[in-house]
Amino acid sequence: MVDVSERPYLRFQRNTDEGDQQLKPRSEVTAAELLREVGAVLRMSEAEAAELGGIPDDPDDDQTMIINMGPQHPSTHGVLRLMLELRGEEVLRCKPIIGYLHTGMEKTGEQLTYVQGGTNVTRMDYLSPFANELVFSMATEKLLGIDGDIPERATWIRMLMAELNRMSSHLLFMATNGMDIGAVSMMIYGWREREEVLRFFQEVSGLRMNHNYIRPGGVAADLPPGWRDGVLRLLDLIPPRLDEYDILMTGQPIWRERLQGVGVITPTEAIALGATGPILRSTGVEWDLRRDQPYLRYDDLEFDVVVGSYGDAFDRYAIRLAEIRESMRLVRQILEAMPPGDYRIQDKKVTPPPRARIDESMEALIHHFKLFTEGFKVPEGETYVAIEGPRGELGCYIVSDGSANPYRIHMRDPSFVNIQCLPHMMRGGLVADAVAIISSVDPVLGGVDR
Amino acid sequence: MSAVTVESHGQVVVFPSREEYLEVVKSLVDEGYTACSDLTGVDYLTHGGRELPDGIGAERFEVVVNLLDMQQRRRIRVRVQVPAEEPSLPTLFDLYPGTEAMEREVFDMFGIAFEGHPDLTRILMPEDWDGHPLRKDYEIGAIPVQFKGANA
């Protein structure tokens, strides 16, 4: 073991102050820096660069100003701070500054066992807890080598919860998007429908959010009696409400005026920037990991990958609305296909003994105790697993050193990458549209900062 | 391509040396890996010893890049060794502009400098923070709490 008291990182002290995170005034940046800042490689054409270069550099004659939007702003979805350079109402440059919600969850993950890990990852992107737990469990199972032995019922329960989670996440998007654009009553409606889905989550896992329900080896508990009625109730309740959304928003001239042609991004740009999920699909790229790199049993189900054609904020709204309907279609199929059987793998290594056995068997009690205090050891190795979360590719990279804790756990959160599209989408737009654009990216800062 | 390629849990992994890194990634772009889905780092300081293919000397840090080919629906992972004495790598920003934030995160968390990165500053930690939290020798709970601009 290395003596940690040495603090060898102090040698790299010079690296720790490389400069400001903030957007510098135009008078302090050179043209070359300016080009790189907005991404000369791709994000700006030569003509646009020339036009930007034509803006006077003289600070006395400067017609631009730099303002902060956030971190405490009702429309920045958490604590996102944007620095905007404005010329009048026009946004010239934009820089997202993040980290206000950083709590070192990847570091925390190194201190927790694989048994405890689910409670940590589920809190990262707090609007898609099941997706986080799912990808963490899948990565752990891959390292354990049991990814092929997960019981059918567990797999289908996982799919059911993942799709319901997509619905609840997109329903919340409907609420916040409506609120950001000014359809404030929409906020109440979206939240109301999401709450219905969360109520079902509570029936199944005991918690509305941060469930720790999907665990390595299966799920924590079987679906409760009467779960079918709960799902059917949702499937009856939500479609008419979505039709109401269509009346309230989709067909509304004001709504369309606010979103169409706003925050446009092209397929090339989206791919280069690493954008995934509804942002990528809004540009017309058909890419959905559920279909293109199927995991669980998605290849047995029938669903459509919804794509847009203009890459604007309206497409992203419409895609999410359509994805709620597609998810309901999937849930309906899952409901019919749900097989009987075990909800977790009967592998003594990862599965605790049933509660009843603990009362009658000393071995079971010891086994239970050891599993929850020490966890289980995972063979040395590393793996990357990706699934389609509500916001795009949700990846989990785990390095194991053979102990019961992950040596390194990294979550590739879609929001973190998608947020890089903001400067590009905003450039040349209006401040008023900035709010619509942030909203259409649908970032969750818990996932961005981790 | 001279770099060693192995398979890990059904996933293809390439081990280029630090000098080959940029060349290897460039050739992967030409092969169709048009998207970079993830870039992250690992500090192997306290790891008991990992399995590496022959000819690859273990260094303290590793930068892990996950690339995606959407046409042929395949993934590849690039693992490059970065020595502790000189923690730096060329940036992938010119090939994948989307790595900008990811490289900043690796810089912030591990102190690995990416040469040619347009804006290599801390991204998650405050800009005047000391040390790099995800390093294995970063003392948890043993550092003074840092406040910006406080009158101490």
Image: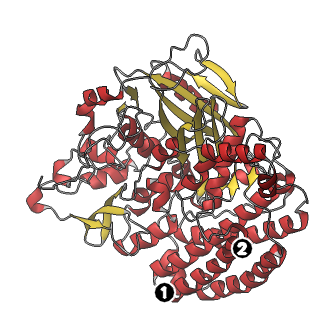
Of mark 2 and mark 1, the one earlier in the sequence is 1
**Displayed quadrant of residue B120:** top left
- Chain for disc number 2: A
* Residue projecting furthest to the top: B55
User: Residue B30: x, y in percent?
Assistant: 59, 30
Label 1 sits on a secondary structure element that is helix
In the image, what residue occupies the spot 39% across and 58% down? A101
For the residues labelled 2 and 1, say whether their Cβ atoms are less than 8 Å apart.
Answer: no
For mark 2, what is the residue? A203
User: Residue A303: x, y in percent?
Assistant: 80, 62
User: Residue A93: x, y in percent?
Assistant: 32, 58
Query: Residue B137 or B28: which is nearer the viewer?
Result: B137
User: Residue A399: x, y in percent?
Assistant: 58, 34
Q: Is residue A285 visible?
A: no
- Chain for disc number 1: A
Height in image: A257 above or below B62?
Answer: below
Mark 1: give few (<14), some (14-19) or many (20+) Cα within 10 Å.
some
Q: CA distance from mark 2 to mark 1?
A: 30 Å
Q: Is residue A401 visible?
A: yes
Q: Amino acid at mark 2?
A: Glu
Query: Residue A344 or A168: which is nearer the viewer?
Result: A344
Height in image: A111 above or below B9?
Answer: below
For mark 1, what is the residue? A184
**Displayed quadrant of residue B51:** top right
In the image, what residue occupies the spot 65% across and 84% down? A246
